[in-house]
Amino acid sequence: MYVATTRASALDPAVPAVHPQFALPLERAITHATADAAASVGDGSWLGRIALGYAADFAVLDTDPFDADPELLLVARVVRTVIDGRTVFEV
């Protein structure tokens, strides 16, 4: 998400952004990584969204990515993972 929203290197954020005019808003980057990715492989009718009838697969981070400075996306940690509606990992 960091690279999509900043066009900067996640490995070395000091490297200047490449084509920053193509940076995406975080919401759009998440949609591309979830709903659009599921649709691209033919699974858009049951994956890629948090909605009734969809597989409830998601991760909870230790920070709100919408409230955070983009650099904090680089250090955000997963504190819970839910697959098919069941918690499979929790800190």
Image: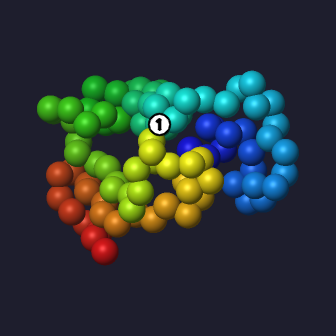
Position in image of residue 74 (x %, y %): 59, 58
Q: Which part of the image, by quadrant, shows the N terminus? A: top right
Indicate left or right for 87 with 17 as reference. Answer: left
**Judging from the image, what secondary structure is the residue with disc 1 in?**
helix
Give the answer, above or below, for where 86 lies relative to 37: below
Position in image of residue 90 (x %, y %): 28, 70
Residue located 76% across and 31% down the image:
20
> Label 1: few (<14), some or many (≥20) within 10 Å?
some
Indicate left or right for 56 with 91 as reference. Answer: left
Residue 59 visible in rendering: yes
Give the answer, above or below, for where 36 lies relative to 83: above
Give the answer, above or below, for where 84 lies relative to 34: below
Indicate left or right for 58 with 36 as reference. Answer: left
Q: Which part of the image, by quadrant, shows the C terminus? A: bottom left
Residue located 30% across and 34% down the image:
49
Residue located 34% across and 66% down the image:
79
Disc 1: which residue: 30
